[in-house]
Image (spheres, rainbow, N blue to C red):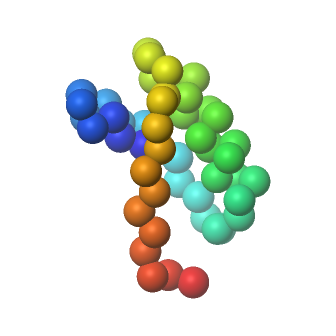
Amino acid sequence: MVDTATEWTECFPLVVREAALVVEALECAQNLFPWPVRELDFENDSAS
């Protein structure tokens, strides 16, 4: 995740595309940012 205003970055590698793991990673990342996450923008690639 990247805060576009400050470029603050938190990385969570996911080895599989599973919705529950994405949600868990987002919840963990929210706790690492020093301000509330107000909006998410997803960039989906063409990988299956």
Q: Is residue 18 above or below residue 45?
A: above
Q: Is residue 14 above or below residue 3?
A: below
Q: In the picture provided, is 2 more to the left or to the right than 33?
A: left
Whether residue 11 is visible here, answered yes or no, is: no
Seen as rendered, the residue at the extreme top is: 34
Q: Which residue is found at the position 64% from the left and 34% from the top?
A: 27
Find residue 20 and report its horizontal and vertical position in percent: 75, 54
Find residue 29 and report its horizontal and vertical position in percent: 54, 33
**Closer to the camera, 39 or 2?**
39
User: Quadrant of the image for the N terminus?
Assistant: top left
Find residue 34 and report its horizontal and vertical position in percent: 44, 15
Whether residue 23 is visible here, answered yes or no, is: yes
Q: Which residue is found at the position 48% from the left and 30% from the top?
A: 38
Q: Which residue is found at the position 45% from the left and 82% from the top?
A: 46
User: Quadrant of the image for the C terminus?
Assistant: bottom right
Q: Is residue 40 above or below residue 14?
A: above
Q: Which residue is found at the position 69% from the left and 43% from the top?
A: 24
**Closer to the camera, 18 or 41?**
41
